[in-house]
Image (cartoon, coloured by chain):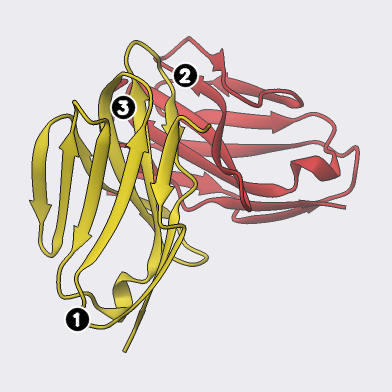
Chain colours: A yellow, B red
């Protein structure tokens, strides 16, 4: 079992829909990261969080430390949100990040 | 503000050739990383440098060497390229161990 599991692996939705991507992890963490990668493009850090909730524009990230679970929500989704979303955790005491496999999101107009 | 700059963007090598991927950041970050990304495998850490003057192996270090030349620059060298090293390589930096990551735009390497 991977230390970081994301679901779903692929998600297709219509423009305007509310999107939820989930991330579960099995290790103790210092922080959890959500990253975005557009097709053929670079990787951008969206959020880093260790508790509670963060919001940036239409994006919201939440984390439940007790349940070892995080969600990334996108409100009023738009075709430009189409990308791969990657969850990664900073293991407590370790230097490296552990990455999930990513969720490929496609928003159709 | 350039952020993290990686060169080259694309490279084709023949098996056995050597090359160095360059990475520089202008954010005065302490930690720097080299990752490779392969289909279905996600991002995997090759080497990292927690601070200037230190380097450590990640998950997949075999076939690679690194140099933290100074605080800004962290290079990745392939001494004798193999087809298994065909991948997209990303350099990243962060201010501290637990800080947001900043990625370069990637290098697409093909080894024939």
Which image quarter: residue B58?
A: top right
Label number found at residue B49: 2
Residue A98 placed where, x, y %?
44, 30
Chain to which mark 3 belongs: B
Residue linked to disc 1: A16
Q: Are labels 1 and 3 on one chain?
A: no
Q: Which residue is mark 3?
A: B29
Q: Which residue is pictured at 31% across the width and 18% down the height?
A: A28
User: In the rendered image, is residue B96 in sight?
Assistant: no
> Which of marks 2 and 3 precedes in the sequence?
3
Q: Nearer the viewer, residue A56 or B33?
A: A56
Q: Is residue B105 visible?
A: yes
Under circle 1, the secondary element is: loop
Q: Residue at x 85, y 32 (%)?
A: B80
Taking the spot 25% from the left edge, 78% from the top edge, the residue there is A78
Location of residue B107 in the rendering, given as x and y in whole percent from the top left corner: 60, 51
Left or right of A43, for residue A67: left
- Which residue is depicted at the point 40% across and 17% down? A95
> Looking at this view, is B92 or A67 the one in front?
A67
Circle 3 SS class = loop
How far across and how far down the image is residue B101, in percent? 33, 37
Q: Chain of mark 2?
A: B
Disc 3 packing (10 Å; few <14; some 14–19; many ≥20): many
Percent x, y of residue B23: 51, 38
- Left or right: residue A46 versus residue A89 is left
């Amino acid at each position: 079992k991977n230390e970081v599991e994301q679901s779903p692996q692929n998600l297709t939705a219509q423009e305007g829909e509310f999107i939820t991507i989930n991330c579960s992890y099995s290790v103790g963490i210092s922080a959890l990261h959500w990253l975005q990668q557009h097709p053929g493009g670079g990787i951008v850090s969206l959020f880093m969080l260790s508790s509670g909730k963060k919001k940036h524009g239409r994006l919201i990230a939440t984390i439940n430390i007790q349940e070892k679970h995080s969600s990334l929500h996108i409100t009023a989704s738009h075709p430009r949100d189409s990308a791969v979303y990657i969850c990664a955790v900073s293991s407590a005491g370790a230097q490296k990040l552990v990455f999930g496999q990513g969720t490929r999101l496609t928003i159709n107009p | 503000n350039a952020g993290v700059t990686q060169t080259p963007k694309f490279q084709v090598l023949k098996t056995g050739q050597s090359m160095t991927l360059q990475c520089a950041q202008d954010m005065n970050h302490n930690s720097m990383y080299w990752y490779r990304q392969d289909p279905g495998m996600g991002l995997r850490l090759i080497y990292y440098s927690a601070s200037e003057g230190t380097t450590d192996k990640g998950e997949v270090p075999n076939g690679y060497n690194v140099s933290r030349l100074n605080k800004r620059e962290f290079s990745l060298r392939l001494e004798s390229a193999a087809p298994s090293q065909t991948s997209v390589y990303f350099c990243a930096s962060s201010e501290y161990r637990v800080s947001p990551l900043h990625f370069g735009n990637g290098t697409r390497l093909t080894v024939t």
